[in-house]
Amino acid sequence: MSITTIQRRFSFQLRAEYDHQDVTSEVEQLTAESGIRTGVAIIQLVGSTGAVTTIEYEPGALGDLRRALDIVAPIDAHYEHNARWGDGNGFSHIRSALLKTSISVPIVDGRLALGTWQQIVIINLDNRPRSREMVVVVLGECD
């Protein structure tokens, strides 16, 4: 067996304040191309106002997540970031810090170890549209 590493950058155009995209197929395809049987996929969304997470990619669960974020870090709350920079996106920095910009998913028998209803999702939390870059690194053992 040998250790292999493969990486790829992906770009996505996302609208403001909670636009999202299921990126599971991109990560699955890169995993398949790598030939890795046992390892890990590391998914990073570049920037401090976006997030990557896993969730069931369906309107109910996505709406529930949005409502939870509205409670924890409301758009119209006072944020020192806004007072300093005047850009009005303090809420998006907090939401990003809570959800995180990176996740890792184990690779078992050449496949991502995701549940039946678990997808990898990127989210633009900023108050303006963004071109989001996702970096995926897959590493592990090949047969």
Image (cartoon, helix red, strand yellow):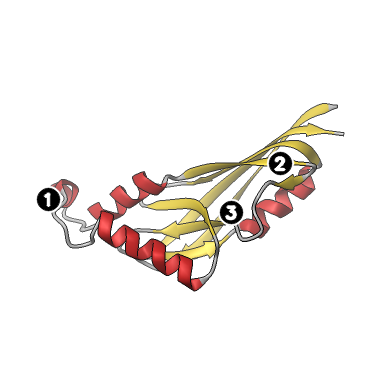
Residue under pointer 2: 107
Residue under pointer 1: 83
SS at circle 3: strand
**Which quadrant is home to the N terminus?**
top right
Task: Mark 2: give few (<14), some (14-19) or many (20+) Cα within 10 Å.
Answer: many
Point out residue 138 in the picture as x, y percentages from the top left corner: 67, 39
Q: Identify the residue at image location x=73%, y=54%.
A: 29
Residue under pointer 3: 10
Mark 2 or mark 1: name the one nearer the start of the chain.
1
Cα separation, mark 3 vs mark 1, equals 33 Å
Q: Is residue 14 visible?
A: no
The numbered mark at residue 63 is none
Q: Which mark is in front, 3 or 2?
A: 2
Q: Is residue 36 left or right of residue 58?
A: right
SS at circle 1: helix
Cα separation, mark 2 vs mark 1, equals 44 Å
Placement of 80 over or under 120, stated as above or below: above
Point out residue 18 in the picture as x, y percentages from the top left corner: 39, 64
Q: Identify the residue at image location x=23%, y=52%.
A: 90
Mark 3 or mark 2: name the one nearer the start of the chain.
3
Q: Is residue 83 visible?
A: yes
Mark 3 or mark 1: name the one nearer the start of the chain.
3
Q: Amino acid at mark 2?
A: Ile
Question: Which residue occupies the foreground of this view, 87 or 124?
Answer: 124
Mark 3 near mark 1, Cβ–Cβ under 8 Å? no
